[in-house]
Structure formats: structure tokens, C-alpha cells
Amino acid sequence: MTPHVVVIDDNADLTEDVRELFEDYGARVSVFASAEEAEPALRADPHDLALVDVRLPTRSGLALLPRLREASPDGEIIVMTGAATVHSAMEAVRHGVHAYLKKPFDPTDLLKLAERALSQVTLRRERTLLSRELARSEALYRAVIDTVESLIIGVDERHRIQLWNGRAASVTGWRAAEARGQNVCELLVDESARGRLHAMATRAHAGGEEEARVPIRTRAGAERIVSWHVRPLVPDAAGGPMVLLAGVDVTERIELEARAANAEAMAAMGRLTSALAHEIRNPLNAATLQLELLRRGARKAGDDALLRRAEIVTEEVRRLSSLLDDFLGLARPKHLAMDGVDVARIARQVHELHEPAARAAGLACELRVEGELPEVDADEARIKQAIVNLLVNAIEATRGHGREVRLELSAGDGRVSIAVIDDGPGLPHARVLEPFETTKEGGTGLGLPIVQRIAEVHRGTFSIGSRADGPGTRAEITLPARAAAQSVRDPS
Ligand SMILES: Nc1ncnc2c1ncn2[C@@H]1O[C@H](COP(=O)(O)OP(=O)(O)O)[C@@H](O)[C@H]1O
Ligand SMILES: [Mg+2]
């Protein structure tokens, strides 16, 4: 590129000589006779090299130096003067000028100086360009490693973290600044599994490459299963050898797989056991009948001991029978009799049936229906069973603990919500949705799993937990409202 040389001097003879000299050299030359003339032009057309006279008509050339620097940060300046003073020389040095040249000067000296100055400008420009390129490609690579869905961790030969991407931070909870410099195995892996990741990283430093699942512990203490790919990283010129650990958090995937396998096993088991349950029901009926006869006989004979024994057995058989009912409810909802159902009507029936029991337990039992509810596509008997299970649970838990149980129905967002709220003692533990988890003498632990199952087969949701607004429990089923086409009339 043609260098741009600017000459600022009021001596016309000298400037013409200098112009000729530099044009011969192959430069583009601009000449100005005063600082005022030069200043606006400099900003529009920055110099590579400026030759500035100290003594200019109105202002000192030295005052122009900061402007020149501003206009062209990479440019060089040579100060020329006929009257060199220590002060002006020091000023020039302070402004970082390339040279301080005393007039008169030998043109070849000037050219030599100028050449050196210009080659420095070229070098500086290249460096600026290169470092801009470098910053750009570094930003680019950072953006890339931060957006990938893998944990990207680089470690040195002592397994200290040098590189830590956004995903690593979000999965582990450790920010890059906290992770950097720490031993990756100590930071992330429990002692029991630490040796495995350590061995993988060590082998990778020796050139090996391998994959394995090693669990990590997050900052919050949770375990995540991470599938690691560990391999050596080509070292850069400045840094030492690095090993790259690229990890994919597979915790959810493993859980899903396990759940799917579990669901399959459960379904198979369900089919088997429901057949068995049906088989048990017949002899159970016969036994109930025989027991009734036995009790009557005992009563007639006045045999109180026998009567009491018969009653105990009757009670046990009744319990077994209700266990069977619950159990079949869990296994059965395959054959659903779906129809448009008015949930409020069902809730009223359930309420009417169970309100006396609540009252007997010293509890207020209120039914609230907010506005008009859309119909839902449902098997009426199943929905009723779900509401009964929740209401009975609430009454049983709240008896002797709280004052009320409430059945609340509402609609919104295309769903109908059925909530049972009590001010009882709250849930005893988090496993209440698992089958056979019961805290009740004579409980089956199947009530809630059945509700969950019923919600599922109706494409609904079920949740149970502590109330947000006070002590007690809130259980809620939501069901999708009937398809819009069926409930919204055509306006035409
Ligand atoms: N509203 C509630 N408040 C407190 N605990 C409850 C409530 N509902 C259910 N539970 C707890 O959940 C357990 C499981 O309930 P469930 O599945 O219906 O089985 P069961 O009623 O036969 O025990 C109950 O034993 C009880 O400890
Ligand atoms: Mg129950």
C-alpha cells in the first residue's frame, strides 16, 4: 500500500523539496502550511508518517502532536526544527515521536529515518490486524463451546481445569472462575469414582482416547450421570499439553429408560395379578356367605366366643375384599367407558355421600364450584372413584388434626381442575404415590396410585403436596375439557 506522508511546515521551499523526495520514494504526500489548515484534513485522511515543524505561524507544531496521535494511532511522527531547544526535544519525546530532526538536514538522513518509521507503522498495523483476528476467532470459538450441549472441560497434565464452558457451569453449578485451577476429579467426582476419571485423563495425556460413564456431584450435592469422552488436545504454542473432557449429561435419559422398562414390567405384572385378583374374588364371596351363616348360628346358640371369632374373620375378609377392589381399580382402567361428563354433578354426588362422615369426624366439608365448567371426556365411574379416594384420604388425615376439608372445582386454559384441600397434618413422606405406601392400620396404600392412574388414562394430571397458604394438603386432578369442536358452536 502506498504510504501517506503528511508535511506540516510554513517553509514552502522546504516542503516542495520534501514532497519531491517522498513522491520519488513512492509515497502520497500532503502538504500543509499551518496547524489550522492541517487539523481537519488529518482526521479525514490519516497519515502513516507526519513531518512536523516545531515553529508554525500561529501555533507550535508540538501542540499538534496529540491531534496527530488521535487521528492516526498507528502512524509515526518526525519533528523537524531549526531552533532545537531542550524543552521542545523533551516535549517531542513525551509524545512518543519517532525522531527529532535538526534543520538543515541531509535528505538521505530524512529518507533513512522515514523508511524506518514507515516499516514500524506497517508492522504495527499488521499486529493490530492479527490481534483483532485472534480476538475474533477466540470469541468465535468461545461462543461455539459455550453453546454446545456438552460439558467441555480442558485440563493440564496435573488435571487442573483450564477450560470450562457454559454447559459445564450450568450442569455442575460451578462458575468458570471458581472451577479454573481446581483438580477436575476432586471438584466433580466422589471419592469412590474419582480414580476412574483420573485414570482416563492420565491415559489421555499419554495419547489415549476413551469413553465411559462416570457420575459427578454438583455443587448443590446432586448426582448426575455423565457420559465422558476423554482425549488429548493438540497443545498450543504457549500452553502445555491439555486433555479435553467432553461430557454429556445422560441422567434424564437413563431415568427415562429405567422408567420405561419399569412401566413395561408393571403392565405385565398388572395383567397377571388382575387375573389372579378376579380368581380370588369368587372364593372370597363364598367365604363371606359362610361366615354370615356361622355368625347367625353362633348368635342363636349364644356362643359369644365363636361369634367374636367369626366377626374378626369377617372384618379381615372385608379388608381383603376392599384391597382387591382398590387393586383392580389400579389394574383395570384399560376399558374406559368414555362420555361427556359433568364433573360438578359427580362432585355433588360424592360430596353428598361423604359429607356426613366428615361431619361425624368433626370437620366442615364444603363443595365450591367456580363458574360454569365445561364437560370432560371421561369414564364417569373412574372420575368418581378418584374424587372419593381424595376426599376420604383428606377426611381420614384431618380427623382430630384440623377443621375442614374442601372440594373445589374450577376451569381455565381448556382444563377442568378438581382440588381436595384440607388443613390436616400434611403428607407423612414423599412416597405416597407409590403402591402399598400407607400409614393407616388397615390401609391399602393404593388410593393415590389409583387416582394417579385415572388422571393418566384421561390425559390429565395429578399432583399432591403441601398447601401454599397454610398447614395441610392440597391434591389436584386436572382434566382436559372436551375438544373445542364439540363445545364451541359454529357462529354462523
Ligand atoms: N390429605 C392427606 N393428608 C395427609 N396425608 C395423606 C393425605 N392423603 C394421603 N395421605 C397419606 O398418603 C398415604 C397413602 O394414601 P393412599 O394411597 O390413599 O392409601 P391409604 O389411604 O390406603 O393409606 C396415606 O396412608 C396417608 O399417610
Ligand atoms: Mg386412601
Image: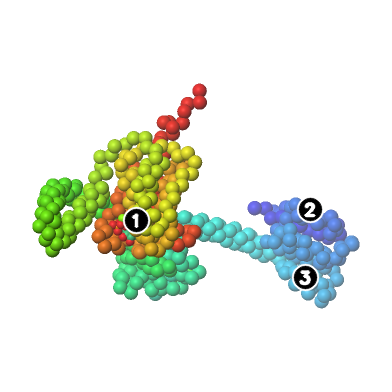
Q: Does the residue at mark 2 contact the one at mark 3 (Cβ under 8 Å)?
A: no
Q: Secondary structure at mark 3?
A: helix
Front-lying residue, 61 or 171: 171
| Mark closer to the observer (1, 2) | 1
- Give how far across and how far down residue 297 sits, in percent: 10, 54
Q: Which residue is mark 3?
A: 92
Q: Which residue is mark 1?
A: 393
Q: State whether residue 440 is above or below residue 379.
A: below
Q: Residues within 10 Å of mark 2 (few under 14, many from 20)?
A: few
Mark 2 or mark 3: whose residue is earlier in sequence: 2
Q: Amino acid at mark 2?
A: Ala
- Give how far across and how far down residue 113 sits, in percent: 71, 66
Q: Report the residue at 52% width, 59% height from top.
A: 138
Residue 111 shows in the view: no
Q: Report the residue at 33% width, 44% height from top.
A: 384
Residue 288 shows in the view: yes
Q: Is the CB of the residue bearing disc 1 within 8 angstroms of ligand 1? A: yes
| Mark closer to the observer (3, 1) | 1
- Give how far across and how far down residue 225 sits, in percent: 34, 62
Would residue 416 appear left or right of 285 to someone viewing this image?
A: right
Mark 1 or mark 2: whose residue is earlier in sequence: 2
Measure the C-alpha gap from mark 2 to mark 3.
22 Å
Q: Amino acid at mark 1?
A: Asn
Q: Which residue is mark 2?
A: 41
Q: Quadrant of residue 427?
A: bottom left
State the colouring used for the structure image: rainbow
Farthest residue toward the bottom? 86
Measure the C-alpha gap from mark 3 to mark 1.
92 Å
Q: Secondary structure at mark 1?
A: helix
What number is the disc on residue 317?
Answer: none
